[in-house]
């Protein structure tokens, strides 16, 4: 059976282009057609550069035919989160503040993709300056979840995750400061990875929390994820925090084998607030890996409850300083009427920034202010160091830590904005990874009753992306192909029951739900989880 | 004034380092380029740009720290100082607050009474300079030039150890000399490559506590510093004597008016919200790096003075003047190495060089003539190719343009005329034309010979050896 060009993964597409079965131009055209057809509904993109993409695709095609481009991403159309600078192409950070900003330089990660022959389609929507977990703080409208347009795609890389899920690109780049790749990947049923801090150059990434920001891939599967990470990872002298690594041949870890892999599940990640369907699906995934020979056990990670206040202190502090450069002087938004310098600053920034950005700037300015620095900022740094230590201890025992990505599946549009604290709490399973500088991957492990995807998170020690890729790849093989988001076709994905392992290896895309037919082990886990919660309530 | 007062002074000295490129990007630091032509995304604060430390800045800062007996911080960090101003493109300045590169140093100065005194150095930190704002009166708008944005600075913060303007000047001279010897900066106050802010307080003589201090800015010369110290000391004493309080504030010195005015008080002081810059990794100074910098420290002034005395035998006065500038000392040593005549080289520096420096208001470090050319000039005089007077004229051209004296003498036909026949002819003409002087001489007025020599030299357009003229004149008279 011939696979439609739009259904191919990035790596499959590039192979087909190199084999002469299709062309980079056809692929770009197919994507632009999809965008044209669907993006009014989803609003994944802030900027679509159709002409640029096509001319780039033509040039890449020639170089592929000349044998100059042979890599696994040659000719593959990609979407770039709008906080990554692209020379000559609008880069807004989904803010009114940068509504007219066209950089004169390109982010190193994007430049690496271009060198590998990837074709940039445009820039994806996001929470303003990456501050938010739903892509609802964008100045350019909300992005809708392709699995159900009444729900958010997550954030802040919501446009990138939704574009991959909706088939409006083959893969995308996002940035992850506290879960901004992994959480939207989970909500949109795609794979998303935040590499070890320093693996991908931050040059050209508009900074939010500099000590936490990392760029990473959002892809259709783990194979694409490894190929993209391998391409964007580079030592870059322009970024002082960039690390020279020899072990970035991530595709070599695409091995179906978890025999003897030590997996720890932090009990802290399964406590109060975690949706029972999410919990069941995540524990089921652990079971699946255990049946393949992984050694799975629970442990106490500790300090998890301190991660959120520490994160919002550090990230807001850095953001308050990082966003000072947006002042109306040199570029970006300047208010129309003003009397003098300081009124100009105040009005430009008041009008140019949205509510969430202003909230975090105020929070960050407060925690850095004289008299409060020690009590807040320094204390948060100490918590950060303790969290890193807790992970170090865990990784002495385990190769991989397994848990949920987010407490729930994608919430409905508008449900989070009214309660920022609740939105902040949604980051509980992802932010400790950023505080400790670790790599983490999110991949789909089921859908809930309403058909929304559930994400599984695997966390590794610094520089151990390969272990994550191996575990994720193996799990993906066990799970089988994941369902497609089909909201645009007027259908919501319905549970089609759990498939057997044998079936799941077929190319038929079958979605699976946590609520569907459980295996015996799965049910046992589910019951256990229920009992625990009961027990908790009695306390 | 009924009571005795003591002035207590500490300095914050900013020094622009002589690196070719800026502290956090590869842009040129050259002075005088067209506005905003030496800029890039980093030094104009573009989103997504990142700073990368110029290693030379670190090495210069450590070298200055070693020369001022500081402890070198082996694990230093950069911090952001947050404040909004259009010349500050990121609206934060990358500086060092918590872990500066050097701490707890000192330099020894000579006091006016001739004694030695230690001035403590609290710390030295690295930071970036801001751009320059220009107000266009005609268009009524402000323009900003980011060429200077990101030029590397070190700030040397002294302890409040100085008690007079004289000590302040001695301290600044000492710092300037050390830094010039290191080649870390040209330290020009007028051009702003060295800037000093004066923290000053007064207290009754013998008091244990310091008084309330003010910080004085906009001091562009040693003279301005001296005047500002005198003015501020007087102002503070007047306040105290009249029962008022000194307010802790920053003041700006107006040297033309000879007075200062308050810029901002401590109450208006901004909260800079310093925190470690997450874009830069901590600076780890290795043993190897420290040793390498220590080993490549130049010979400083005191060592030079000692060596000059032993090696060259030139007068102490000459040594003092020559070693006051690293450039002049280098010139002296290089020219001496070529011609082997230290006293003659020194004479040129002490005489004509100092005269022209004064006349043309030139700094010692801006002397343009090369040691090779000075050595050649000395050789030309020694070989009697030119006489002393012509040599002075040639030197003046060398001082301006560093011409090759051999070629210049050749081209301009300035060689001494050694043709005795021609000389005798001219002398005969001079004797014939000045009978009165000849008469005077013969009547015992010895001075008259000088006039006749001068007339002969004039007739020869200076191209004669005056000693030879004198000799022939005597025989003819």
Image: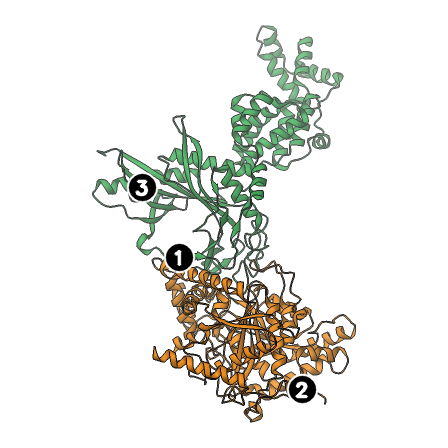
Chain colours: A orange, B green
In this rendering, which labeled residue sits more in front, label 1 or label 2?
A: 2
Distance Cα–Cα, label 1 vs label 2: 60 Å
Q: CA distance from mark 3 to mark 1?
A: 24 Å
Residue at the far top: name it: B443
Vertical arrangement, residue A267 with respect to residue B392, above or below = below
- Quick one: quadrant of the C terminus of chain B? top right
Disc 2 vs disc 3: which is toward the camera? 2
Residue A204: x percent and y percent? 57, 66
Q: Residue B179 at x, y = what percent?
A: 52, 39
Check disc 3 and report the residue beneath it: B201
Residue pointed to by mark 2: A507
Q: Chain of mark 1?
A: B
Do circles 2 and 3 both sit on a common chain? no
Q: Is residue B440 above or below residue A478?
A: above
| Rendered residue at 55%/53% (across/down) | B53
Residue under pointer 1: B272
In this orientation, does residue A167 appear? yes
Question: Do discs 3 and 1 share a chain?
Answer: yes
In the image, A47 versus A411, the foreground residue is A411
Residue A522 lies, in percent from the top left, at 52, 83
> Does the image show residue A211?
no
Helix, strand or loop status at disc 2: loop
Give the spatial CA distance, label 2 vs label 3: 83 Å
Left or right: A115, with B93 as reference point: right
Quarter of the rendering containing residue A458? bottom right
Mark 3 secondary-structure assignment: strand
Secondary structure beneath label 1: loop
Q: Seen in the image, is B76 located left or right of residue B264?
A: right
Q: Is residue B218 left or right of residue B26?
A: left
Residue at position x 41%, y 71% in the image: A358
Subunit under mark 2: A
């Amino acid at each position: 059976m011939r696979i439609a060009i739009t259904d191919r993964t990035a790596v499959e597409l590039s192979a087909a282009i190199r084999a002469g079965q299709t062309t980079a131009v056809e692929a770009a055209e197919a994507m632009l057609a999809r965008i044209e057809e669907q993006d009014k509904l989803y609003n994944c993109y802030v900027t679509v550069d159709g002409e640029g993409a096509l001319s780039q695709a033509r040039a890449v095609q020639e170089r592929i035919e000349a044998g100059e481009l042979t890599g696994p991403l040659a000719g593959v159309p990609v979407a770039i989160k709008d906080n990554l600078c692209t020379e000559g192409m609008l880069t807004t950070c989904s803010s009114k503040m940068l509504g007219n900003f066209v950089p004169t330089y390109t982010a190193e990660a994007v430049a690496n993709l271009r060198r590998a022959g990837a074709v940039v389609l445009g820039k994806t929507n996001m929470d303003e300056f990456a501050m938010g977990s739903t892509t609802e703080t964008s100045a350019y409208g909300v992005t809708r979840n392709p699995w159900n347009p009444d729900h958010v795609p997550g954030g802040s890389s919501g446009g990138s995750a939704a574009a991959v899920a909706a088939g409006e690109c083959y893969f995308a780049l996002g940035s992850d400061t506290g879960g901004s790749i992994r959480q939207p990947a989970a909500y949109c049923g795609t794979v998303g990875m935040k590499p070890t801090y320093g693996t991908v150059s931050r040059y050209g990434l508009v900074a939010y929390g500099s000590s936490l920001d990392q760029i990473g891939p959002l892809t259709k599967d783990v194979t694409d994820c490894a190929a993209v990470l391998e391409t964007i990872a580079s030592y870059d002298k322009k970024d002082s925090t960039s690390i020279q690594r020899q072990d970035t041949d991530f595709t070599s870890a695409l091995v179906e084998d978890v025999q003897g892999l030590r997996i720890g599940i932090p009990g802290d990640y399964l406590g109060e607030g975690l949706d029972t369907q999410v919990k069941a699906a995540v524990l089921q995934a652990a079971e699946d890996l255990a049946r393949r020979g992984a050694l799975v056990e629970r442990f106490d990670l500790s300090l998890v409850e301190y991660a959120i206040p520490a994160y919002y202190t550090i990230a807001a502090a850095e953001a308050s300083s990082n966003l000072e450069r947006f002042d109306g002087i040199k570029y970006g938004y300047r208010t129309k009427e003003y009397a003098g310098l300081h009124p100009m600053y105040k009005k430009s920034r008041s009008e140019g920034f949205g509510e969430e950005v202003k909230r975090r700037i105020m929070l960050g300015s407060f925690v850095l202010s004289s008299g409060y620095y020690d009590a807040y900022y320094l204390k948060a740094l100490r918590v950060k160091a303790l969290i890193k230590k807790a992970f170090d201890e865990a990784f002495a025992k385990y190769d991989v830590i397994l848990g949920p990505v987010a407490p729930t599946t994608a919430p409905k549009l508008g449900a989070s904005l009214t309660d920022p604290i609740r939105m902040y709490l949604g980051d509980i399973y992802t932010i400790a990874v950023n505080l400790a500088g670790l790599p983490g991957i999110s991949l789909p492990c089921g859908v809930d009753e309403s058909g929304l995807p559930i994400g599984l998170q695997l966390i590794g020690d610094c520089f151990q992306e390969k272990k994550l890729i191996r575990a994720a790849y193996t799990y993906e093989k066990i799970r089988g192909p994941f369902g497609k988001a089909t909201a645009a076709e007027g259908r919501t994905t319905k549970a089609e029951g759990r498939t057997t392992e044998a079936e799941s290896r077929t190319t038929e895309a079958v979605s699976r739900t946590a609520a569907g037919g459980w295996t015996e082990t799965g049910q046992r886990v589910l019951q256990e989880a229920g009992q625990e919660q009961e027990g908790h309530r009695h306390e | 004034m009924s009571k005795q007062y003591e002035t207590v002074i500490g300095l914050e000295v900013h020094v622009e380092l002589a690196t070719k490129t800026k502290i956090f990007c590869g842009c040129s630091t050259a002075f005088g380029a067209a506005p905003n032509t030496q800029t890039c995304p980093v030094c104009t604060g573009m989103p997504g740009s990142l700073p990368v430390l110029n290693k030379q800045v670190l090495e210069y800062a450590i070298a200055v720290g070693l020369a001022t007996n500081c402890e070198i911080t082996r694990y230093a960090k950069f911090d952001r100082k947050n404040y909004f101003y259009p010349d500050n493109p990121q609206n934060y300045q990358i500086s060092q607050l918590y872990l500066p590169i050097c701490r707890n140093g000192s330099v020894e100065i000579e006091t006016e009474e001739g004694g030695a005194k230690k001035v403590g150095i609290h710390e030295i930190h690295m930071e970036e300079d801001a751009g320059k704002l220009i107000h266009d009166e005609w268009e009524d708008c402000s323009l900003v030039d980011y060429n200077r944005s990101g030029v590397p600075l070190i700030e040397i913060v002294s302890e409040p150890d100085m008690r007079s303007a004289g000590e302040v000047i001695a301290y600044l001279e000492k710092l300037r000399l050390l830094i010039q010897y290191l080649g870390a900066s040209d330290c020009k106050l007028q051009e702003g490559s060295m800037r000093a802010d004066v923290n000053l307080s007064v207290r009754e003589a013998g008091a244990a506590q310091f008084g309330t201090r003010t910080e004085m800015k906009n001091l562009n010369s040693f003279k301005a510093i001296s005047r500002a110290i005198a003015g501020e000391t007087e102002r503070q004493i007047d306040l105290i004597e009249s029962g008022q309080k000194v307010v802790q504030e920053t003041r700006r010195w107006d040297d033309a008016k000879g007075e200062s005015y308050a810029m901002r008080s401590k109450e208006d002081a901004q909260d800079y919200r310093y925190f470690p810059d997450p874009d830069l990794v901590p600076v780890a100074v290795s043993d190897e790096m420290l040793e390498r910098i220590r080993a490549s420290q130049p010979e400083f002034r005191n060592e030079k003075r000692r060596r000059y005395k032993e090696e060259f035998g030139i007068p102490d006065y000459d040594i003092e003047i020559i070693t006051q500038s690293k450039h002049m000392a280098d010139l002296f040593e290089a020219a001496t190495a070529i011609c082997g005549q230290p006293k003659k080289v020194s004479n040129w520096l002490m005489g004509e060089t100092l005269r022209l420096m004064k006349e043309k208001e030139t700094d010692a470090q801006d002397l343009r003539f090369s040691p090779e050319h000075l050595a050649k000039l000395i050789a030309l005089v020694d070989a009697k190719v030119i006489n002393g007077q012509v040599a002075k004229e040639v030197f003046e051209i060398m001082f301006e343009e560093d011409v090759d004296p051999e070629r210049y003498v050749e081209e301009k036909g300035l060689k001494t005329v050694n043709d005795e026949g021609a000389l005798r002819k001219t002398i005969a003409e001079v004797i014939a034309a000045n009978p009165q002087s000849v008469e005077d001489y013969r009547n015992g007025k010895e001075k008259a010979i000088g006039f006749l020599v001068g007339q002969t030299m004039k007739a020869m357009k200076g191209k004669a050896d005056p000693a030879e003229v004198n000799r022939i004149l005597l025989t003819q008279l």
